[in-house]
Amino acid sequence: QKNLHLLSPEQVELAKMLLEEGQSHLFEHWAEPGVDDDQKKGFFEQVARLNSSYPGGLTSYIKNARRLLADSKAGKNPYDGFTPSVPTGETLTFADENFINFEETGVKEARRAAFVLVAGGLGERLGYNGIKVALPVETITGTCFLQHYIESILALQEASYKLLQGESQVKIPFVIMTSDDTHERTLKLLESNSYFGMQPTQVTLLKQEKVACLDDNDARLAVDSKNKYRIQTKPHGHGDVHALLYSSGILKLWRDAGLKWVLFFQDTNGLLFKAIPAAIGVSASKQYHVNSLAVPRKAKEAIGGITRLTHADGRTMVINVEYNQLDPLLRATGFPDGDVNSETGFSPFPGNINQLILELDSYIEELTKTGGAITEFVNPKYKDSSKTSFKSSTRLECMMQDYPKTLPPSARVGFTVMDTWLAYAPVKNNPEDAAKVPKGNPYHSATSGEMAIYRANSLVLKKVGVKVPDPMLQVFNGQEVEVWPRIVWKPKWGLTFSQIKSKISGNSSISQRSTLAIKGQNIFLENLSLDGTLIVDAVDDAEVKVAGSVQNKGWTLETVDFKDTSEPEVLRIRGFKMNKIEQLEKKYSEPGKFSLTP
Ligand code: UGB
């Protein structure tokens, strides 16, 4: 009351709302007027931000929190009344006719796509100090995830344009969701690298806000322990992306520009773009409103399963069910063995890799109803079984893959399963945790993430006829991985099977100890025999034929101990580095036709 004169009319409204919602404790420790006035203003600025960044404002947040906390206290299962079954979707095999056709459709459709990267998370599990999109995908060229993603989108844009000669050149929009933890560093990474070749106007950064923490089952907002004029906040989860896109107005701009598809992806999957063209093709051919990318999943593997849920009251949805919920749900609904492998050796429920393709019109229609709000959950850590108090404050959370939960049954929700080696190798776990992963399960570490790139590129080249030997097994940071020849190329060299095939002819071979980096667009391998290291770079209007035998001492993989602080962190987290002994390196900076024949 005594501080009311400090407030603007809007702030008075916010104060009233807080009092009505049972939040008077927030003001209990306020000083007399004239003391801490700036901090009090800061408090209301924060409340205004928390209010405007949540669909329905803080009142809705507090109400939702009370409801979810009551459900949690009562031990209510969100899947009560639902019976799981295997949904229908598309399963693709790399390089077969079906896959190639979907890729061609996907490349055509890409001119009507927009990409959204959720990159607000810091990746505490990885224990890396920087932002994850700045991590190298591989250490041959040191290309970081953000650069790789941008170059892949540009390659798709170019390929789409080439297939549709005559249509005006499109610029595929790219949104990055950041947070206070990642925003500045993401922007700086873009600005200091000229947006990695993308037009700055193509890129939009949308920053997600954190949400208020909750102290008890009455959803009393938590006061920050270091500053009594601040509410403690924590991340709300990647589900925020939907509300942010909606409130930014960008979706309608995209629709007006004739776009049709919105693709969501995560911060550290270096393989993803090998799966994207075909997956867009599936969305377009099947007219899916929602298409989730998935990989075969071993029963009980620690990734969510895509599941059809049918409620006793007739409701039905196709949705990701987290792995720790899927098995109990199956057991409770007439499948006494729970989540088990079928005769294929995999669970019948495909593994969600959280890359979604949404059809724009139906997406806008849905968000217009929900304001972008996504089904939330709360995960309080209770002090004891009475569930009356928490060990520490909690908050509501939401996940982007829960978007289909509110869709009407008429929505076409499907999925596309691709081989894991082609589509999924995230970098999430630190070396110590990765080394504890049970044998046969994926490490999802910087070590496995980089090795997965080499394996995928080797397998792709094998498919187009290059002779590539079997891998060696090696242990880095306590993780046994397959070591294939270290092969990388720029996305513009080959994003689809047909593009890659068009760059290779004759009988080529690459030995296991070899390293190959193709950095230009028009580099053609003809009867190449590589045993060592070869690096070729060329400007786009130079055409280079590489033929003959390249032999040198090459680059070896040297072990790096993750505890060795004399090595850079990016090398320590992968457990190896390239020892660059000898290489053949050629760069073509002028237009023209060239032949590299050692
Ligand atoms: N992210 C944000 O942008 N904002 C946030 O508030 C939080 C995260 P994690 P997680 O791929 O195997 C997801 O932490 O949450 C971004 C799926 O929920 O890497 O453990 C963050 O920057 C899960 O179902 O993953 O699990 C990153 O880009 C499963 O599919 C992305 O969100 C799992 O990913 C994911 O954040 C998986």
Image (cartoon, rainbow, N blue to C red):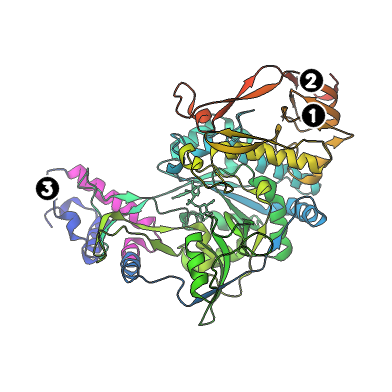
Dot 3 corresponds to which residue? 31
Percent x, y of residue 392: 27, 53
Q: Is residue 242 above or below residue 200?
A: below
Percent x, y of residue 580: 65, 19
Q: What is the secondary structure assignment of the residue under circle 3?
A: loop
- State the residue in front, 103 or 554: 554
Q: Is residue 274 above or below residue 64?
A: above
Q: What is the secondary structure assignment of the residue under circle 2?
A: strand
Q: Quadrant of the N terminus?
A: bottom left
Q: Quadrant of the C terminus?
A: top right
Dot 1 corresponds to which residue? 541
Q: Is residue 135 above or below residue 530?
A: below
- In magenta segment, residue 61: yes
Dot 2 corresponds to which residue? 551
| Disc assigned to residue 561 | none
- Separation of residues labelled 2 and 3 (CA atoms): 77 Å
